[in-house]
Image: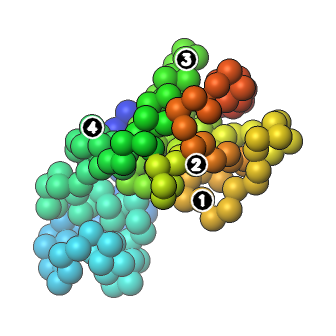
Amino acid sequence: MAEPQLTERQRKWFQSMRDGLERDTGKTLAEWKAIALTCPETAPRARLKWFKDTHGLMQNRASWVIDETFGSGSAWSDPDALSDALWADPASRAIYDAVDAAARGPDGVIGAARKSFAAWSRKVQFAAARPVKGGKLMLGLALTPDASPRLEPPRNESWSERLKARTLLAAPNEVDGEIAALLKAAWERS
């Protein structure tokens, strides 16, 4: 699997997952790739489900085997395209650009797009953002909601469980000094 920008901790985790494949499953990558070629499914989610249901191979390793078997058709191989698809709405893109600039202010920040959100990390993830209908952006932070009156607890977010607060941003100018300070406080905790 092509790796997006990862923290050192994330790189080590992925490497340990790969290193332990044969030990944990009793099969080599070559054997898993041969099994993948027998998969009757063609859609990525369906292939993942097939691996889990049929062979007990869970999502991270199954994703890796699928990518190794069928090529890097995954969005991870082109992070710019992934980001462009995520932030296709010009209004939410403008807010994202403002958040991204503020989030990358401190040293050592790694930003990466995921399929449904963008994330910022240092050692661990400290912030994430996802587009919201109507050209808005939901920003999640590794802070508690009491850090600011602008924050509330998250509800059904798909990002890291470390992000304990969120705020809805409706325009780029809402990414002000307070949001920059909240991003920096979350960064300091990562």
Q: Quadrant of residue 5?
A: top left
SS assignment at label 2: strand
Question: Which of the two labelled residues, at mark 1 and mark 3, occupies the earlier sequence position?
Answer: 3
Determine crowd level at label 4: few under 14, some 14-19, many 20+ residues with C-alpha closer than 10 A.
Answer: few
Question: Which of the two labelled residues, at mark 4 and mark 2, occupies the earlier sequence position?
Answer: 4
The residue beneath circle 1 is 157
Instruction: Please indicate whether residue 60 sits to the left or right of residue 80 in the image.
Output: right
Q: Nearer the viewer, mark 1 or mark 2?
A: 2
Q: Is residue 91 above or below residue 177?
A: below
| Mark 4 vs mark 2, CA separation in Å | 20 Å
Check if mark 3's residue and mark 2's residue have beta carbons within 8 Å.
Answer: no
Q: Nearer the viewer, mark 3 or mark 2?
A: 2
Determine crowd level at label 1: few under 14, some 14-19, many 20+ residues with C-alpha closer than 10 A.
Answer: some
Image x and y of residue 52, in percent: 39, 77
Identify the amino acid type marked 4: Asp
Q: Nearer the viewer, residue 4 or 114?
A: 114
Question: Which of the two labelled residues, at mark 1 and mark 4, occupies the earlier sequence position?
Answer: 4
Identify the amino acid type marked 2: Met
SS assignment at label 1: loop
Q: Nearer the viewer, residue 143 or 9?
A: 143
Image x and y of residue 110, in percent: 46, 28
Identify the amino acid type marked 3: Gly
Determine crowd level at label 3: few under 14, some 14-19, many 20+ residues with C-alpha closer than 10 A.
Answer: few
Quadrant holding the C terminus: top right
Q: Is residue 66 above or below residue 42?
A: above
The residue beneath circle 4 is 80
Residue at image location 27% in from the left, 75% down from the top: 47
| Mark 1 vs mark 3, CA separation in Å | 25 Å
The residue beneath circle 2 is 138
Question: Which of the two labelled residues, at mark 3 and mark 4, occupies the earlier sequence position?
Answer: 4
Identify the amino acid type marked 1: Glu
